[in-house]
Image (cartoon, helix red, strand yellow):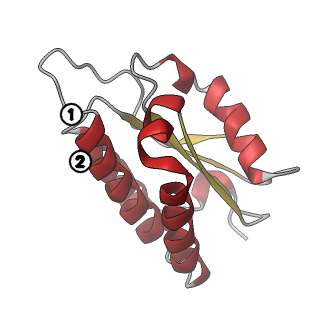
Amino acid sequence: MANSKNFFNEAEQTRIIEAIKAAEKNTSGEIRVHVEDECKGEALTRAEELFGQLGMHKTEKKNGILFYLAVKTRNFAIVGDAGIHAKVGQDFWDKVSSKTTALFKQTFFAKGLEEAILECGQQLKKYFPYQTNDTNELSDEISYS
């Protein structure tokens, strides 16, 4: 089985990064994807821990979103910071997670992430539209551990 660093081929990595860039183009929000081999414990707990480690809680408007995937243990979670969570609510995260998981079950991992990223980008655009003084506060690259 592939490990986290080679789980996505180069083309898939590019598509995911391009989805992040497209989603962030019209918003002040920030989106990250983190992939690791194994999740020991609850995926959401691990994703929240990584959210802090990646500095995602430091965005000015508290509008960061992290997509977390552990490839060997088949865990997935989405974490939205307080600002975006207050706008979209738990039902939104549950729906996005459910759609993404359905694609993952068909082994469409990159497609699942792309679609989820773009859907979240629409919500970020709605609630946190791009301002002329916005800066890209966080890397768009996929992070690994």
Q: Are marks 1 and 2 in contact (CB under 8 Å)?
A: no
Q: Quadrant of the C terminus?
A: top right
Residue at 28 percent across and 28 percent down: it is 28
Residue at 17 percent across and 14 percent down: it is 133
- The secondary structure type at the circle numbered 2 is helix
Neighbour class for label 1 at 10 Å: few (<14), some, many (≥20)? some
Marks 1 and 2, the one that precedes in the sequence:
2
Residue at 80 percent across and 54 percent down: it is 38
Residue at 66 percent across and 54 percent down: it is 4
Q: In this view, does 137 lie above or below 130?
A: above
Query: Is 54 in front, or is 93?
Result: 93
Q: In this view, does 49 lie above or below 107?
A: above
- The secondary structure type at the circle numbered 1 is loop
Q: Which amino acid does label 1 sit on?
A: Pro
Among the 4 quarters of the image, the one containing residue 34: top right
Quote the CA–CA distance across marks 1 and 2: 13 Å
Neighbour class for label 2 at 10 Å: few (<14), some, many (≥20)? some
In the rendering, at what x and y percent does residue 26 appear? 18, 39
Tell me the tag on residue 22: 2
Tell me the tag on residue 61: none
Q: Mark 1 points at which residue?
A: 129
In the rendering, at what x and y percent does residue 130 appear? 18, 30
In the rendering, at what x and y percent does residue 3 appear? 70, 58
Q: Is residue 68 above or below residue 72?
A: above
Q: Is 6 on the left-hand or right-hand side of 45?
A: left
Q: Which amino acid does label 2 sit on?
A: Ala
